[in-house]
Amino acid sequence: MTWRPQYRSSKFRHVFGKPAAKDSCYDGVPITRSVQDNNFCAVNPRFLAVITECAGGGAFLVLSVHHTGKVDPHQPRISGHRGNVLDVKWNPFNDYCIASCSEDTTVKVWEIPPHGVLKNLTVPWKELQGHSRRVGLIEWHPTANNILFSTAYDYKVMIWNLDCPEQVIKNPVRTISHHTDVVLSLSFNTDGSLFATTCKDRKVRIIEPRSGNLLQEANCKTHKASKVLFLGNLKMLFTSGTSRWNDRQFALWDQDDLSVPLLEENLDGSSGVLFPFYDPDTHMLYLAGKGDGNMRYYEIGSEKPYIHYLTEYRSHQPQKGMGVMPKRGLDVSSCEVFRFYKLVTTKSLIEPLSMIVPRRSESYQDDIYPMTAGNRPALSAEEWLSGIDKGPVLMSLKPGSQIAESYSEMGKGLGNTLDTRRSHSRPGMLQLAYIQDKLETKEGTEDGGNTEEERSWTPVSNGEDYGLCSPPRTENELRLKFHKQQEEIRRLRELLNQRDVRVTQLELEMKNMKNSQPHQGSL
């Protein structure tokens, strides 16, 4: 009989939650008092958007991610809706584009100025009019550019194509009417060829979006699902909700067979909705309850028992909603694998919460940062509507390996050529053509030949846009900025040294090849 250890080996067993210091939080934010079960907050590496309470109509704030501290009570807002705003979502491929939906039955898409909202915005870039009742939920397609999904209290899911010249769009490209009650949540699979919904009628549905065909439907009497997630490429669905006795519960489903759940587990008797968040890169699942101060996290596996409990983050401050920073905005130097923005209504506070893998080394950890979904679309709207499916365009989070810019900036061509050249090389290797180009660029810079495009470029490092940073207000902040700058200089020096070594190696290889050619000719 062979001995087997009773524990399961995992590099994420000791992940811990680290709340931000008081001066790194956003204080004095009038967070909405809406009872809608949404997150009320959306984040990208440049901006944070949060729905606020206001007297007439609906509004939300857009702040620079680095503009922490006390928020001005007269901060300009986006206030073009006539009813309360219920949901906001950033375009995953454009950091300056955000969609919002409201009780006024419309969905509006806004363009944010590069240096933030300096005056109240009331005129949207696009206005989508098609729903007959209040719109409660919106989602961007994960791989196709400018495709937006919306669901409303008219029980319909509508698909919108924003690549059209009209400012007001009244006809969606597809209307899906399989639901008999309000849609509570919506989630896409990895390539966006399917989406799953939970509904107030207790059913979980899997739908093909372009045709509108209903592929699977679950009607489990022992589990009432409120939120649903596709678990990456694991071919599984995760739902959170309540049991027959109103205990909070989660369930796991086989994507191809929704007749019976693979797993059901009761958690507690609290009444707040459970918000699930899944990281497909680390296979970690986070469960945060509305009105709770704690957060549980698990690791998902492809074999039984499927879900492995890791630990729990505890706090005395209850959350109303949670925003999530995309992976490209994380601080990889501190081994941060996930970052939440916790809405604490009792203190009018937004508190960043970092999930960190404890490591002694300060160097980049390849094993916890695989290639992840970037900010470039895999498809145009027309390509996706014509029936093409593609997975997300991946990027590396290694500092210096790729410049994370928004899609609108990438259209200029600088980022595209850089990524294309690097995609053909092995990891950690630089092509000779790329090195030569960089050397030529360096020579041109020394000669004062900077192009207008290069002069207008703003440096971005780990999601921090130095052009949008607010100046330090205290000695503490100044010291922190200084240390960050020193760390950045040290990292860039290491990167330059590595590239110098690589250039020397390539020069030696070229010299050896030239020396070997005459010998081959004499033979």
Image (tube, rainbow, N blue to C red):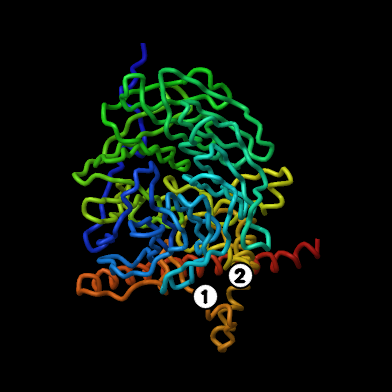
Q: Nearer the viewer, residue 43 or 374?
A: 43
Q: CA distance from mark 2 to mark 1?
A: 10 Å
Say which element carries label 2.
Answer: helix
- On the rendered image, what quadrant is the N terminus found in? top left
Q: Which residue is mark 2?
A: 414
* Marks 2 & 1, CB-CB < 8 Å contact: yes
Asked whether the viewer can see residue 405, the reply is no
Q: Nearer the viewer, residue 444 or 519?
A: 444
Q: Could you tell me the amino acid type at mark 2? A: Leu
- In this rendering, the answer to whether 361 lies above or below 284 is below
Q: Nearer the viewer, residue 177 or 519?
A: 177
Residue 133 is tagged as none
First along the sequence among labels 2 and 1: 2
* Residue 10 pos. (x, y %): 36, 35
Asked whether the viewer can see residue 170, the reply is yes
**Position of 328 compared to 415: left or right?**
left
- On the rendered image, what quadrant is the C terminus found in? bottom right
* Residue 265 pos. (x, y %): 35, 23
Q: Which residue is mark 1?
A: 457
**Position of 94 compared to 305: left or right?**
right
Task: Determine the residue positioned at 34% across, 35% down.
Answer: 273
* Residue 24 pos. (x, y %): 27, 62
Q: Could you tell me the amino acid type at mark 1? A: Trp
- In this rendering, the answer to whether 501 lies above or below 41 is below
Task: Determine the residue positioned at 58% across, 73% down.
Answer: 438
